[in-house]
Amino acid sequence: MTGEPFLSIRNLTVGFGAGGAIRAVRDVSFDLEAGKTLCLVGESGSGKSVTATSIMGLHKPGSAHVEAATMRLDGINLLECDEREMSRLRGSLMAMIFQDPMSSLNPALTIGFQLREALLLHEKMSTRAANARVMEVLQRVRIPDAARRMSAYPHQLSGGMRQRIMIAMALICRPRLLIADEPTTALDVTVQAQILWLLSELQREFGTAIIFITHDLGVVAEIADDVAVMYAGSLVERGPVHAIFENPAHGYTAGLLRATAEFVPGEPSRGRLEEIPGNVPSFSMLPQGCSFVERCRFAVDSCHRRTPDWRDVTFGHASRCDQPVAYGPTANLTVEVSA
Amino acid sequence: MTTVSSPALSKPKPARPGVAVSLSLLALAVVILMAIFGPLVFGLGNDLNPMMRLKPPSAIAWFGTDNLGRDVFVRTVSGARNSVTVGLCTAIVVLAIGGTLGVVAGYFNWVDRIVMRLADGLMAIPGILLAIALVSVLGGGLVTVIIAISVPEIPRTARLMRSVVLSIRELPFITAAISVGSSTPKILLRHIVPNAIGMLSVQATYVCAAAILSEAALSFLGVGTPPDVPSWGNVIASGKEYFRLAPWIIAFPGLLLSIMVLSINILGDRLRDRFDPRLAARRAS
């Protein structure tokens, strides 16, 4: 390790609207090492996807103002890349899997054509060699009868199959960073398990770094190395997955964990789940002080006055909360973190 | 490997064409045959025959004769060539220019601002007036007529394509294509255009029908093709003063013109239904 992390984001701020006035992402910083999985967690509208599309440079031109102190991937400064350099990096160094497999494939083109195009954009090879690679990657993502599926159109495949095609498309050039934006939200649970398993298998083999965006804490427990919790456009807590699950140090994280259902075979359910009162504040009317203050059970006067700074809880685990001891261990969710 | 083919992968059965569609196809086939072979078999029907002026339909002249004794049947059959040529050429020119402008305008905002303001300007002038003005400036002839009819049609097609592209470019698969590293020209040609082809082909039928009508109107007004090249428009024009004496001069080319335009429109509607399943379901219910 040469000291510089594989992906390093510092003070990423993304604004929309006139002059970037509506700041959907504020001051987000994190690092990610090769071969590791970072889960970005948070409810809808917390800025998870905007963070991801900013790294990929996928905002519509002129629609978003992206600013950051640092945005480096594998030694490349993404902030200095122009559109042409970015499109060379997309697909080869970094790739993205989208939430909705139903509409993320071009309905007018065959599966084989789309996969081959993704490959030929970055690597010079004959059509024949490209077809062989496409076949190989289709088999890797467990598409049965791959030769025949290559001439199929997206509408002829099921949702789980299409998501696997999307994964194949993202992985065909063996990117070193994979951003998965809720890749399993639209799928049923058995397919979801297959997809997660597939991702971690491919990660082990190619040493891919994964940013996994989700609001499903069960998925997080299964695949994450590190977790970053987002609320109203900012990170509020980050750290290794077991530290966060066992000892959440922010009111929002604790609330999320308490709101997760647990099923233990043979035991009666614990009744009503706890909820987080209220709604996410709108970006144009964030409360003073901590942005979670109005919904936090543990808020004290000082929470209303100033935005808390980052505070270390344990090594590698930090939270933006001034009362990190108040939440205690969550007995609600058993975490099995595979070593 | 199983030999049983899954239903999901088998080709959907094409729906049976209705009576209207079959008749339209038949009518179009007849008109196109007339356009290709009419002048070869019957000539252009320019022979004047003072002895045969304004004769009603008979075994010698099936559609009767006009005021100069020309055979209306021969001129109508041969006139199909003009209509078909103008209709097809206009559709191709309009789709090529208007379609390209629309696709580019739909994807690049700065092109959009320029092209759409020009289109607004052109659309403010009535199409037939613009066409007459263009013919007067450029002089008569088939090519001129095609240009004159195309110019007013281009903004409408460009506008339609622009709106189609605007909605396609927001779809997730375009972002997905960008995310694997596709360049902008590839996005436009491989991802957007194939998805717009459906709308484009429907628009082609409407442009074609409108062009045939416009050509007839221009010929009727005397600014279309010269009189020695028969077209439905100038045959009708030659009969307008004798309408009460010899209605057949106007009736037969007029009937053919109506049938052809109607057939093209029926086929266009049918195509639109095919490309928009929701609309087809609503009509069926």
Image (cartoon, coloured by chain):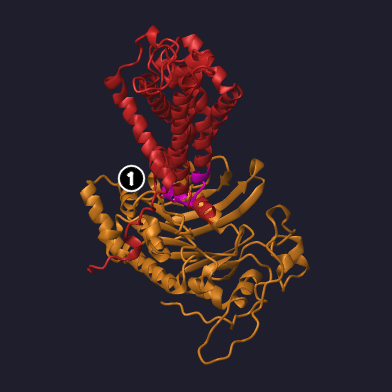
Q: Image point 46% across, 71% down: which residue?
A: A188
Quadrant in which the N terminus of chain B appears: bottom left
Q: Position of residue B48 (x, y in %)?
A: 37, 8
Q: Disc 1 designates what residue?
A: A121
| Magenta residues, start to end | B167-179
Q: Which chain is orange?
A: A
Q: Position of residue B248 (x, y in %)?
A: 46, 22
Magenta segment includes A5:
no
Q: Position of residue A218 (x, y in %)?
A: 51, 74
Q: Is residue A163 above or below residue B27?
A: below
Q: Is residue A11 above or below residue B147?
A: below
Q: Image point 56% across, 26% down: which residue?
A: B119
Q: Image point 38% across, 19% down: which residue?
A: B75
Q: Nearer the viewer, residue B215 or B60?
A: B60
Q: Which chain is red?
A: B
Quadrant in which the C terminus of chain B appears: bottom right
Q: What secondary structure predominates along the stretch shown in magenta?
A: helix
